[in-house]
Amino acid sequence: MQPTLFDFLYWLSMAAVAINALTGVLDAGRKQMDVVGVVMVGCVAALGGGTVRDLLLQRPVFWIRDPNYLVVAFLATVLVFLLVRRLRLPATVFLIPDAIGLALFTVAGTQIALDHPTHWLAASLLGVITGVLGGVLRDVLCNEVPLIFVRGELYATAAWMGALVLVLLELVLGWQALSASLVAMLVIFLVRVAALAFKLRMPTYRERS
């Protein structure tokens, strides 16, 4: 891996950890959890997806190999907890940070899988796992229906679209990894925000009467 790409993935993953920790705190805060519960939810949201990705790739788990990720997750949860614990937060407050975290983690996960190396289709799905699983665990711990399972919600779909855009740009069209990653992140974020703004939904299964 080129040093510039390595540095990009490192700081991209670090930013994703901080953002997902933030969403965990905001979600846990609405449930009026104490600091222990908030830290647990925040760290699980920040580290869960990447952990499963690394286990599937049979590579050292990223936050065990580099404890700086764990430190960032812990500090982000505590800091946000101290800043917002006295605020009454609406249910939708974490949706935009969550969209940012989804974009960052999906692209980082896809790039890591491609560099492993992994087949492009498997790499795109591992990117989706990296992007969505932390949020799934966060919502389960907060006794919420995970966004990925909300009827017709463009969540995992947005992540997979971005992952496939990354594969297309980098492997088929020959773009540099950094440029392809930035475009893919923008695609994920815009699709997710558009879905929220215009209530875009995927078709759902319905039983015929």
Image: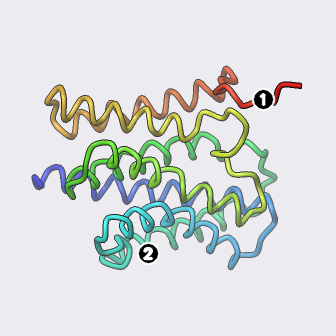
Residue 206 picture location, percent across and down:
78, 29
Among the two numbered marks 2 and 1 on one chain, the one whose residue lies closer to the N terminus: 2
The relative height of residue 185 versus residue 114 in the rendered view (above or below) is above
Single out the mark in the foreground, 2 or 1: 1
| Tag shown at residue 71 | 2
Give the residue at mark 1. 206
- Judged from the image, the secondary structure of the residue bearing numbered disc 2 is helix
Q: Point out the image quarter for the C terminus.
A: top right
Which residue is depicted at the point 54% across and 41% down?
156
Answer with left or right where residue 56 lies relative to residue 208: left
Answer with left or right where residue 205 lies relative to residue 104: right
Q: Amino acid at mark 2?
A: Val
Which residue is depicted at the point 51% across and 34% down?
158
Give the camera-side residue of 25 and 194.
Answer: 194
| Image marks 2 and 1: residues in contact by CB distance under 8 Å | no
Residue 13 picture location, percent across and down:
36, 57
The relative height of residue 185 versus residue 14 in the rendered view (above or below) is above
Residue 43 picture location, percent across and down:
55, 70
Q: Quadrant of residue 33?
A: bottom right
Is disc 2 surrounded by few (<14), some (14 to 19) or many (20+) residues within 10 Å?
Answer: some
